[in-house]
Structure formats: C-alpha cells, structure tokens
C-alpha cells in the first residue's frame, strides 16, 4: 500500500512538471508569436510530447541502471545522455511539426530551424535534461533517507538477544590506572594512531589498545563498525543519510557526524534489518 502511494505521488509530480512546462511554452508562443491560441497549443504540444516520451525512457534507465553506479561513471553517462536527449528531442520536434492537416496527401515536410534557433533548441534540451535529473535524484535521495530512517527506527526499537547479554561496562587503562566506563555513557570509539579514543558523555579518554580489540569485545553489545577507524554505539545514532557512492553520514547524539565507508554502510544496513 505504501509503495503504491509512493508511485502515485511520483507520477503526480511528473505530471505537474510536464503541465507546467507546457503552459510555459504556451505563454511564450502567445507572447512572442502573433498566432491563435489553438496554434500556440499545437506548437506547445509539439515541444512537450517528445519530452514526455523520451523523459519516461530516461527516467527508467537512470533509476534502474545508472543511479547506483560510481559518481564519475554517472557524470560521464549523463554528459552523453544530455547530448543524445537534446538532439533526439530536436529531431522529434521536426517530425511532429512536419505533420500538416493534409499530410496524407502532401507528405511530411521537415523544415530545419535556422542555425541560431537550432543551437537555442539544443541548449533548451540540455537544460530540460538537467532539470529532469534534478527531479529524479531528489526523489531518489528522499527514498533513501526514508528507508534509512525507517531502518534506524527499527534498529533503535530492537530488543537485545537474551541469549547474548550485553556488557554494561569496559575498563580503560589511562596513565597506568584502570577506569571503568559504562557503555551507556560511551558514544563512539575512534582509532588514533596506536591508540583508541573513547568518546563518552563524560569526556574523551585515550588508551593503548587497538580498535579491533574493542570491536571484538563489543560485537554483541550493540556496536557497529562503520569505518575502519570508527566504532559507534547503535543507540547513540540519531540519524543516517546517504552521501552518494554507497556511503552514509552517521549523526550521533554527541553532535558529531561520521561518514561511514561502503563496508560500514553495509554493516549499518545489515544491523538494522
């Protein structure tokens, strides 16, 4: 049911965008050209209908095959797609404009634009393509954020497994003295050279121990290795949002934000399942 509402919402968004584009063209033709409203409507449709047809195909390709690829690869493909989109749109406009009321008898007559008008039309195509990608990526980021927030909410509500009781504290050796740190006060651990910095509600402590040792010790206590240099307590995570290229920005209760690696982002998503 939720998925259907999302599809209807996105469909409505695209319909509104295309209608606004058509109205903009209609107003432009009425202001610039001395022609009837009916002729302006026809000219606006000649411009907008090809955009709708190509736009649907582009949207399906980007969402299904491109949006999850590396950023550099996406930029290169979008550069080529923008050029193809602009030229294909221009060609379809010429074909659509060639259909006259008596086209069955007289045939389709293609009348290319003047050079300056052609360049302007191609520039419009690139701008419209960029605007379409803005809508596609904005919608995708919204979906990713909603999915992450939903997964995070489930993770925060998850009850610990009774067969694997959580630790309630760890001991940290500081200046030759062992200090007890409650796990409820611990927010995240950070590798710092040969030491580990423990960020807690009461302050920051450094100790001569590897982060891997702590990761092994706390693996059943609700901690996630989001980066090779960062281990965070799940209950200290306020939110997480995609940063692109498979990574996540993890926001903690302390106010700190940590960018998770790809493996760390996968570990976070796995933990929230």
Image (cartoon, helix red, strand yellow):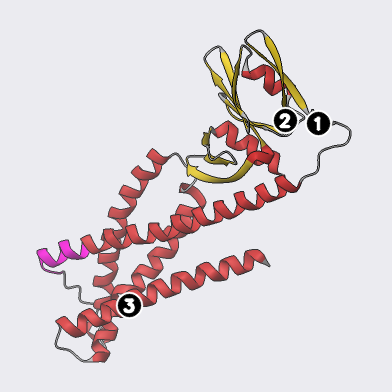
Q: CA distance from mark 3 to mark 1?
A: 61 Å
Viewer-side residue, 105 vs 171: 171
Q: Nearer the viewer, mark 3 or mark 2?
A: 2
The relative height of residue 1 versus residue 42 in the rendered view (above or below) is above
* Residue shown at the point (26%, 77%) measured from the top left: 25
Q: Dot 3: what SS?
A: helix
Local crowd size for mark 2, using a 10 Å CA cut-off: few (<14), some (14–19), many (≥20): some
Q: Which residue is farthest top?
A: 176
> Does residue 270 appear in this view?
no
Give the residues in magenta: 113-122
Q: Nearer the viewer, mark 2 or mark 1?
A: 2
Residue 14 numbered mark, or none: none
Sooner in the amino-acid sequence: mark 3 or mark 2: 3
Q: Which residue is mark 1?
A: 166
Local crowd size for mark 3, using a 10 Å CA cut-off: few (<14), some (14–19), many (≥20): many
Residue 183 numbered mark, or none: 2
Is 58 displayed left or right of 249 in the figure? Answer: left
Q: Position of residue 244 (x, y in %)?
A: 47, 43
Q: Are marks 3 and 1 in contact (CB under 8 Å)?
A: no
Q: Position of residue 55 (x, y in %)?
A: 40, 64
Q: Which residue is mark 3?
A: 22
Magenta span dominant secondary structure: helix
* Residue shown at the point (50%, 55%) measured from the top left: 140
> Does residue 3 appear in this view?
yes
């Amino acid at each position: 049911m939720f998925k259907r509402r999302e599809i209807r919402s996105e469909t409505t968004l695209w319909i509104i965008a295309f209608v606004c584009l058509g109205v903009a063209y209609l107003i432009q033709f009425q202001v610039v050209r001395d022609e009837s409203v009916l002729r302006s409507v026809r000219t606006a449709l000649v411009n907008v209908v090809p955009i709708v047809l190509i736009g649907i195909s582009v949207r399906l390709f980007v969402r299904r095959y491109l949006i999850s690829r590396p950023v550099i690869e996406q930029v290169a493909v979008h550069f080529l797609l923008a050029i193809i989109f602009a030229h294909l749109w221009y060609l379809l406009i010429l074909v659509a404009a060639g259909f006259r009321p008596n086209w069955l008898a007289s045939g389709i007559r293609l009348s290319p634009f003047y050079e300056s008008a052609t360049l302007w039309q191609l520039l419009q195509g690139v701008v419209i393509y960029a605007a379409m990608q803005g809508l596609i990526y904005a919608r995708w980021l919204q979906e990713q954020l909603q999915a992450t927030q939903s997964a995070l909410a489930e993770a925060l509500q998850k009850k610990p497994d009774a067969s694997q009781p959580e630790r309630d504290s760890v001991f940290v050796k500081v200046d030759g003295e062992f200090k007890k740190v409650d796990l409820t006060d611990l927010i995240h651990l950070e590798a710092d050279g040969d030491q580990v910095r423990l960020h807690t509600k009461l302050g920051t402590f450094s100790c001569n121990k590897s982060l891997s040792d702590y990761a092994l010790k706390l693996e059943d206590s609700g901690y996630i290795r989001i980066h090779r240099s960062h281990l965070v307590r799940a209950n200290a995570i306020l939110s997480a949002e995609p940063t692109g290229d498979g990574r996540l920005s993890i926001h903690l209760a302390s106010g700190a934000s940590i960018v998770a690696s790809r493996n760390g982002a996968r570990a976070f998503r796995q933990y929230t399942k």
